[in-house]
Amino acid sequence: MNRQDFLNYMGLAVGGGLVSACFQACEAKTTGQAVNFTLDLNNPANAALKTIGGAVVVNNVIVAKTSSGGYSALASACTHEGATVTYSGSSQQFVCPRHGAEFSTTGAVLRGPARTALTQYKTELRGNSLKIYS
Ligand code: FES
């Protein structure tokens, strides 16, 4: 291997390593954290959850009242770079304000640059108590 071949080889090896590291580090991971809390829908802080299209972010979870009248609870940190997603009642999608990723009400990626789904949590409504859990 001559000097030029060696430099080309090293450039590819280093460059490939950097690209690989970036793909691993730049794609924020879902936390997969265990979740178990209850929201009091009579609490003014949760008033948005009484209206279809409304949403709140609590404990790193975004909870939205969907058009079906049910609730969708997802990890609030975008899986691309961690920005807090919002809920669009008109499109019934979760949207990342930083780079425009879109997620369904189940957390599936509808539009990049995010490539990983948001973690979905279970919801259970009893009276005015909405339980969010893993
Ligand atoms: S941080 Fe959400 S799309 Fe980039």
Image: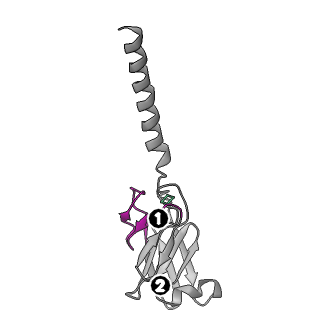
The residue indicated by pointer 2 is 53
Disc 1 from disc 2: Cα separation: 19 Å
| 80 in relation to 70, above or below | above
Which mark is first along the chain, 2 or 1? 2
Q: Which secondary structure lies at badge 2?
A: loop
Other residues around mark 2 within 10 Å, as few (<14) / some (14–19) / many (≥20): many
- Kindly identify the amino acid type of the residue bearing the numbered disc 1: Gly
Mark sitting on residue 33: none
| 50 to the left or right of 93 | right
Q: Residue at x 47, y 41 (%)?
A: 22
Q: Quadrant of residue 122?
A: bottom left
Q: Which residues are magenta?
A: 98-121
The residue indicated by pointer 1 is 100
**Magenta stretch: dominant secondary structure:** loop
- Kindly identify the amino acid type of the residue bearing the numbered disc 2: Gly
State the image coordinates of residue 5 (x, y, percent, origin top left).
37, 14
Other residues around mark 1 within 10 Å, as few (<14) / some (14–19) / many (≥20): some
Residue at mark 1: C-beta within 8 A of ligand 1: yes
